[in-house]
Amino acid sequence: MEAAGSFNGGKYDCLLFDLDDTLYPLSTGINIACRRKIEEYMLKYLNVEESEIPRICLDLYREYGTTMAGLKVLGYEFDNDEFHEYVHGSLPYETLKLDPVLRNLLLSTPQRKIVFTNSDRAHAVRVLKKLGLEDCFEGIICFETLNHPDDPLSKARIRCKPAIEAFEAAISIANLDPNRTIFFDDSTRNIASGKAAGLHTVIVGRSELIAGADYALRSIHNMKEALPEIWEPEPEKQKQQQQHDQTLQSTAVETAVRA
């Protein structure tokens, strides 16, 4: 994934977005439905004691970033693609609606825009299409990006947020300058790791700052009000641009006079 061309000279070169519960609200029910499908998979295919599943599911999520990653650490063997197909195959995607407001916001920003999610690519693509945002992003860093099928380690362990290793991989894959990249996520742990990786950070879904967050957004739709600098060039860059424009104008006038 190569860096895009020049921008307006602002503070940021890239906007890095989490997907689920960040680009759309928690109220859609996707999160709850996903958790239920994971629990169902654990019972049906991994033979985990039914009464223990909710606790194990939550504990693994808290410890390893995703329940799936935790199950691998515990030694459970299963096919990654089959797991994703089962968990995401029947989610209530119909609750996701086209979001022209967010689309217009994203398209109005001059920076690179990349999705960074723990989910698999098929889920990410489907969500973006439902939201009408499929053409708003340069690329998607997802489960397959961080855990390549040809990597023998991916069968026994999973690399995912909030592990610093996952952030470092994303930064390398997308060729990002952390100091000029701003990261949006709804997870407090992911925000803390993003900050530790050197990124500017925005916690989404909250109106108050948390540890590690530079900004807080109640909704992703509040981007422009809370972060106007995304759309504004830095003063020095703006001054240079004005001088450049004046030079071009003077040259044009001089050329016209000589003509």
Image: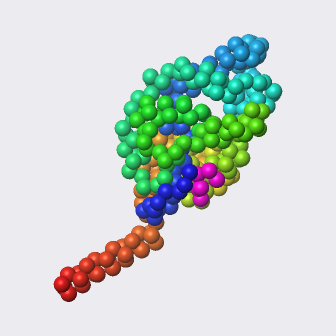
Q: Quick one: which residue is furthest to the right in this view?
A: 75
Disc count in the image?
A: 0
At 49% across and 31% down in the image, what residue appears? 127
Image-quadrant location for residue 47: top right
Residue 56 belongs to magenta span: no
At 54% across and 31% down in the image, what residue appears? 122
Residue 20 visible here: no
How are the colours assigned in the image? rainbow
- Location of residue 237 in the rendering, given as x and y in whole percent from the top left corner: 45, 70
At 75% across and 23% down in the image, what residue appears? 56
For the residue pair 115 and 139, the one nearer the viewer reads as 139
- Location of residue 41 in the rendering, given as x and y in whole percent from the top left corner: 67, 18
For the residue pair 164 and 83, the one nearer the viewer reads as 83
Residue 6 visible here: yes
At 71% across and 43% down in the image, what residue appears? 163
Looking at the image, is 37 positioned above or below residue 64?
above
For the residue pair 242 and 204, the one nearer the viewer reads as 242
- Location of residue 256 in the rendering, given as x and y in whole percent from the top left corner: 20, 81
* Magenta-drawn segment: 172-177
Q: Is residue 225 left or right of residue 44?
A: left
- Location of residue 119 in the rendering, given as x and y in whole percent from the top left corner: 60, 33
Q: In this view, does 220 lie to the left or right of 213?
A: left
Q: In which quarter of the image is the C terminus?
A: bottom left
Q: In this view, does 177 lie to the left or right of 138?
A: right
* Magenta part, dominant SS: loop
